[in-house]
Image: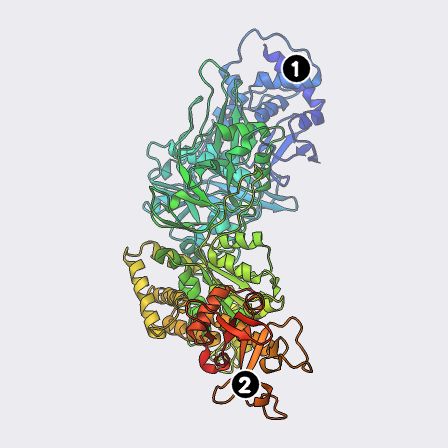
Amino acid sequence: MSESFIHQVAGAALGNFDAVMDHCGMAGGKDQAREYLALNPKRSDAKLGSLATNRDTGAGGDFATGETWGDLVALTAWRFDCSQLEAAERLADLLSIPKPNRQRRATGAERANGKGNTQALARRTPAAPANRKPAPAADDWQCVIPVPADAAPPPAVNPRQGRPSIRYEYRTEAGDLGFLIDRYQGKDGKSFAQLTLWRGPDGRIEWKWKSPPAPRQLYGLDLLAARPAAPVIVCEGEKAAEAARKLAPEFVCVSWPGGSNAVDKAGFAPLAGRDVTLWPDLDEPGAACMGKLAATLAALPVPPVALYLVKPQAFGLSGKGDDAADLLGWDAERFADVCTRTEWRTAIEATKPEKEGTAATKEGKPGKASAPAGGPRICYSLDVGGVYFTDNDGAGKWICSYLEPMARVRNPDNQGWGLLVRLYDPDNVEHKLVIPMALFRGDGLEVAGMLLDAGLTMATGNRQKVISYLQSTRPDARARITSRTGWHATSDGPTVYVLPDCAFGHGADEWLYQAEGSSAHAFKTKGTAEQWRDNVGHLCRGNSRLLFAVSVAFASPLLHLVGGESGGFHYRSNSSDGKTTALRVACSVCGDNGYMQRWRATDNGLEALAMQHCDSLLALDELAQLDPKVAGETAYMLANGAGKTRAARTGGARERAFWRVLFLSAGEISLAQHMAEANRTTRAGQEIRLVDINADAGAGLGAWEELHGHANGADFSRALDQAAKRQYGAPLAAFLDKLARSPADLPEELRKAQKLFEAQHLSDDASGQARRVADRFALVAMGGELATKWGLTGWEPGAALAAAGTCYRAWLAGRGGEGNQEETNMLNQVREFFERHGDGAFDLWHRVGDDRSPRTADAAGLRRWLQPDGTPIAKAGQIEEGSNGAEFQTEFFVFEGPWKNRVCKGLDYRAVNALLSKLGILRHNKGRFQSRLQIPGKGKMLVYHITPQLFEGGADA
């Protein structure tokens, strides 16, 4: 194919200039005199400025990158990265120009000229209309670096763009001026122009608005040479590098000329063997650019000793294109603080570009997956710019934004396999998803839906390729997934504590939290553990209810270590007494202001909450919002650590939910009072699972005893609320880190502390119920004491123990002592029955045969008065006229049916019999709990004989 064909097409293209611009993706620009300004289609420009093409000649270039073309054929070759011949054929098809048969391959020079190589384009004499003179060869001029001291000063004004807003000086390692880059800030946005010094064949030296030849030196090369041991930050753009120098003075901050599209034209050899951190602009071109740079650095004879990638979101950056220059108002101290507290950069493995057909994988990172030999070659590759698909034509096709398969996951039982992937949404926020392998069945629509919902950008019509890419990867890394927080272990693995965003203990990196449903959680962190201690923990001192509530948060992870049972503590007092504030402060140990939950929830909802707070604090406010009909059952469920058994879709039973949890509750009424509203009777088991503590500390300040200088309780509550909103979450993380590395004898030490607590607060006659609850209070005390020992609370040693003792005594006082609550409840129910129905449900013994005496319908038995000396009054004549029996004691004889069904309703009557017999209240024959007596009007029959001792104070169980 002759040069005449290219010449013919170039001339015809000028007559169809706008059609060519549209074909090259450059439509929508504007004319400036005879220059056509357009956005560079090969990068993400937002404003016009640096790229221009002459309508009369077709010559032009992008002054930001230094790339030029002599006619529209060369422009097309640059745009589509093809040879001159291929570009001419493209335009011939567009303009309906006949194409001659190819008789030869394009020359090497032709192929080079078509690929945007600046030097090669400059050396070519382009095909042009007859009235144009050939462009001079670039070999006639040589770029002069460094600039001689006697050279003329550079022009201050660009004839096309005017005076720059700022001029950047590129200096050599010795500090001499190499060349300049001008930045222009106009109404259409920013643009750039490179200004270099050139020497002509006649020795004449001139400044020209063009780029230096590749490899182009770095911006900050002189600083690199001056600090050979300093770590390096590489930014995309001079402005960003300047900003980074102020924020991170311990680093040498550099950039390169030409932006993201010219990264392959810069010389990065000076970074060999250095500690390098790449800081991309917050957009896809920025990510792709740094991906190329990472590969370039890996290919150096001496690669960097360490390579990192900045996480812009660590500094709060979220806008498209944000970089270091967008951290307005930041200084080095603030920047260093963030770097100390957060993971502001991630280590990356710089790998050289792989050859075609290379199968992927090192540490689970995808490379290219190819088909078996002899079949069609299909491969996928991943870099920071996204995922690319390559088939037999060898052209890489972008199919989606960054999507990295990280590990294959399964549950602790080696079931429920899935794929852990990482992606970044359009705001550059990182997302990690576990995709169940079961979703890959069929067309994979559910997988695509998950990815798109998380912010993946997918090329139109490439859903199936993305699914195929994920299915073809085989990461070496493995991880366990769980939908429950807290302690976990496998049969052959160590114990690990899992939180939604991290895990603690040996092997923690192998565990992931994957909640069912929404991935949102409240285990958030703000500030440091020390800041929480000084600003929140300090205010708790001197307040028993506050110290105790916070200690519950630290004690929850200890349940597993001592094999303890779940249970709760309910703060009860009047409105606005501070009980809810105490819960909020306790929640700040673990998370943000949204950590505290409400009782108003379904059974399913509370089960899910318990799973999400296993081995950690669960705080539930407003008990009154819970349906009183189910309040007791709900308290049982939470404390028993297991959900309901439910049917699966297949007809079998679904896996039950299990958890361990210490929970805090608050309300204006107790559990018993709340259940009574629905005519429900509280069982002892319910009341010991959710123990009731009077939140009023007795100091006249509601829940508070020490206001720490505040005028009143309300002001103190507000101060606590504000402090808990400023610092939160860090204490739990610090506590778990210590706990995961604690000595093996810690569980035994905790159990000894529980025994000591019992001995200090209970007598030898205390019931098992009182001891069970004492163990729970003791564990809370040890949680607070451990946190104090590890420097997390700011309290005096012993403060948490004293607070737990105070609250335990308040519970004992409220329940009526250390006896068995079930026996107390039995006795109270029996006593209440006779107090309420003693006259109405029982006929008087001595009036049974009196026809004038009214008879009791459906009588439960008989009652008989006793004289003060205990002698029964069996006949009416034994009673003085007008006496109503007030001066006598009363004993009752209850028929068997009413005893079981009315007196002992809801109770085990056999247990009631045994209790009343033990207390001397039930008089009976030997071998049975009934007495066989001659009953007036009935004859001999078995009855339950209740003595007057029932109503004596000493009869309490």
Q: Position of residue 392 (x, y in %)?
A: 52, 18
Determine the residue located farthest toward the bottom in the rendered image.
881
Q: Position of residue 566 (x, y in %)?
A: 44, 59
Amino acid carrying mark 2 in the image? Ile
* 232 with respect to 139 (left or right): left
Does any portion of residue 175 appear in the rendered image? no
Indicate which disc residue 576 carries: none
- Residue at the location (37% across, 39% down)? 271
Is the residue 342 above or below the residue 810 in the image? above
Q: Is residue 764 above or below residue 752?
A: below
Q: Nearer the viewer, residue 91 or 930?
A: 930
Few, some or many C-alpha atoms within 10 Å of disc 1 (few <14, some 14-19, many ≥20)? some
Quadrant occupied by the N terminus: top right
Q: Regarding mark 2 in the picture, which secondary structure is present there? A: loop
Closest to the observer, 69 or 696: 696
Going by the image, does 744 lie left or right of 951? Answer: left
Q: Quadrant of residue 905?
A: bottom right
Q: Position of residue 781 (x, y in %)?
A: 38, 68
Which of the two residues, 734 or 616, is positioned nearer the viewer here?
Answer: 616
**Would you name the residue on which mark 1 appears?**
8
Residue 485 against residue 42 in the figure, above or below = below
Residue 463 against residue 530 in the figure, above or below: above
Which residue: 58% across, 80% down? Answer: 845
Instruction: Answer with mark 2 or mark 1, whichever residue precedes in sequence.
Output: 1
Q: CA distance from mark 2 to mark 1?
A: 137 Å
Res 873 label:
2
Name the element at disc 1: helix
Q: Is residue 442 visible?
A: yes
Say what amino acid the circle numbered 1 marks: Gln
Q: Quadrant of residue 130?
A: top right
